[in-house]
Amino acid sequence: MKAVGFLKSLPIDELDSLMDVDLPEPALLPTDLLVEIEAISVNPADAKRRIRTAAEQDHTEPFILGYDAVGIVRNMGAEVTGFSIGDRVWYAGDANRPGSYAELQAVDHRIASVAPSSVSPAAAASLPLVSLTAWEMLFDRLQVPTNETPSSLLVIGGAGGVGSITLQLARKLTGLHLIATASRLETVEWCRNMGAHQTVNHHNLIAGVRSAGLETVDYITQYADTAQHWDAMCELIAPQGRIGTIVETTEKLDISALQGKSAALMWELMFTRSLYGTADLARQGQILSRVARLVDDGAIRTTEQKMLHGLSATTLKEAHAIIETGRMIGKLVVAY
C-alpha cells in the first residue's frame, strides 16, 4: 500500500523530512478494524513527533504519522463487535501504532465509532482528536457538571482546534460562562461563533479577565503555552478551581502557588487510554459516537478551515509547514 513516512527528524523543508513509501497492508489484531482511509486531519502532534522521535537516532523503518482519520471498514478481527464491513468510521488513532498517512490502517475498534453521516469525510476528519481531547478535558479531567450550575471557564487558545471544540461542547452541554483568548479580529469572531460569551487578549490575561467583569474563574483550559501563562492562571483561578492543560513544558513551575486556593492542575493527553491500554479504553469510542450524534443533530460544527488533496509527501509537507506557523484557525484536513 502507499504511505508517507520518515526516517530522520528534519526541518519540513528538507527533501527527506517526509517521503513516499510502499508498505505491506497492515496485519489485523483480533480487536482491529482495517480501514481504507478517505480523509485525515493534520495536527500539531504530527509535527512534534516528526521533529522529536528521530532526533537522536534514525528510525530503522519508515515512521507513519497521522492520528485523525475517516474511512471505510474493509475487514475486521474476530473479536470486533458493533461494526460491519462497509461502515464509514472515524477515530484519532493510537500513538503506539502506524498512523493514518496511508491508504489502509489497522485500528482498535474500541477507539473508533461510526462517523457522522451529515458531513463529508473531509469535514468529519477535522474532529476526532480535538473532540476527544476537549471532551476528556471538560468531563473526565476538570469534571465540569453537565447542568446549569453557574460557573466560568477561561479557554486559553480558543481559536485553535481543541479550543474551538471545547467552546462548542461547553456551550451546548454545560451552563458555563465562556471566556476565550483571542488577539486578532478574525480569531475574536471565530471564538464568538464557536460559543464564547466573551473574548480577552492573552497578551495581558489578568487585566483582560478583570475588565470582562470577573475577578476569578472556576475552570481554565490551557491550549497555548503553560509556562507563559502559569502565573496569570494561578492568579485567576478561583479557590477550589481546576486548571487543565495539554501543553508540556520544560520550565519549572511553582505548583505551590495553587496550594492556598486548594486548586488543582490536571493533565490531558488524548493518547493516554490507548498508550496504557486502560480498562476504560472503549470510552473513546463512546465519546466519538456521542460527538457524531451532536454533529448530525446540528449541535456541533466541523472546524475545517483549509483543505489539501492527495496522499503524498508533497501534500503532507505543505500541511506540516502550515501547522508549524502556529497561526491556524480551526483545522487543516487532507482528502485522499
Image (tube, rainbow, N blue to C red):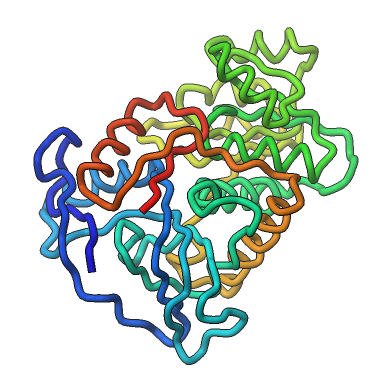
Quarter of the image holding residue 158? top right
Name of the residue lying farthest toward the bottom: 78
Quadrant hosting residue 283: bottom right
223 relative position to 301: left or right: left
Query: Relative to residue 70, is residue 216 drawn left or right?
Result: right
* Residue at the image point whose x is 20% and y is 55% from the top: 5
Query: Which part of the image, by quadrant, shows the C terminus?
Result: bottom left
Given residues 169 and 334, the one toward you in this image is 334
26 or 298, which is in the foreground? 298
Q: Is residue 333 above or below residue 79?
A: above
Give the residue at x 16% y 65%: 22
Percent coordinates x, y for residue 9 in the rendering: 16, 45
What residue is drawn where x is 47% and y is 69%?
72
Return the x and y of residue 333 as percentages of the image width and height. 43, 43
Q: Is residue 254 visible?
A: no
Foreground pick, 290 / 177: 290
Q: Is residue 284 above or below residue 137?
A: below
Q: How many marks?
A: 0
Residue at position x 30%, y 55% from top? 65
Using the image as rendered, state which of residue 274 and residue 219 is in the foreground.
274
Q: Is 117 rendered above or below residue 11?
A: below
In the rendered image, is residue 216 in sight? yes
Please indicate whether residue 114 sits to the left or right of residue 126 in the image.
right
Residue 255: x and y, percent?
54, 34
- Tell whether 55 sits left or right of 183: left
